[in-house]
Image (spheres, rainbow, N blue to C red):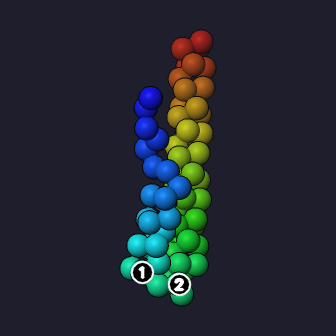
Amino acid sequence: MIPAIMGTYEWLVVVGIVVLLFGARKLPELGKSLGEGIKEFRKSSRTIVEDDEKKETASNEEQKT
């Protein structure tokens, strides 16, 4: 049997340590900034993929002519 990486108890301990380190007042602010960072990362990665697709399409069109 392979043990789980983190069970419920371990997650509760991690959350407890985070609350002790940052305090209950800072957690919503921390969550908001984390969410904004993830949103910005996804936007940037989507832009990079779109740019690559445009370059590939332009390259394919040049090869046809």
Amino acid type shown at disc 2:
Ala
**Location of residue 57 in the rendering, given as x and y in whole percent from the top left corner:** 60, 26
The quarter of the image holding the C terminus is top right
Question: Which residue is rendered at x = 53% and y = 55% of the image?
Answer: 8
Instruction: Tell me the SS state at disc 1.
Output: helix
Question: Which residue is rendered at x = 43% and y = 44% of the image?
Answer: 5
The quarter of the image holding the N terminus is top left
User: 38 or 59: nearer the eye?
Assistant: 38
Residue 56: which numbered mark, if any? Answer: none
Amino acid type shown at disc 1:
Leu
Q: How many marks?
A: 2
Confirm whether residue 58 shows in the render: no
Question: Which residue is rendered at x = 47% and y = 84% of the image?
Answer: 23
Q: Give the residue number, with chain letter if any, for mark 1.
A: 20
Q: Give the residue number, with chain letter if any, for mark 2.
A: 24
12 is higher (above) or lower (below) than 17: above
Are dots 2 and 1 in contact, CB under 8 Å?
no
Question: Which residue is rendered at x = 47% and y = 78% of the image?
Answer: 19
**Location of residue 50 in the rendering, given as x and y in whole percent from the top left corner:** 59, 39
User: 9 or 37: nearer the eye?
Assistant: 9
Label 2, label 1: how far apart the Cα atoms are:
8 Å
Q: Quadrant of residue 28?
A: bottom right
Q: Is residue 13 left or right of residue 58?
A: left
Crowding near pointer 2: few (<14 within 10 Å), some, many (20+)? few
User: 20 or 64: nearer the eye?
Assistant: 20
16 is higher (above) or lower (below) than 7: below
59 is higher (above) or lower (below) than 63: below
Q: Quadrant of residue 53?
A: top right
Q: Is residue 53 left or right of residue 3?
A: right
**Location of residue 56 in the rendering, given as x and y in whole percent from the top left corner:** 55, 26
Instruction: Tell me the SS state at disc 2.
Output: loop
Confirm whether residue 25 shows in the render: yes
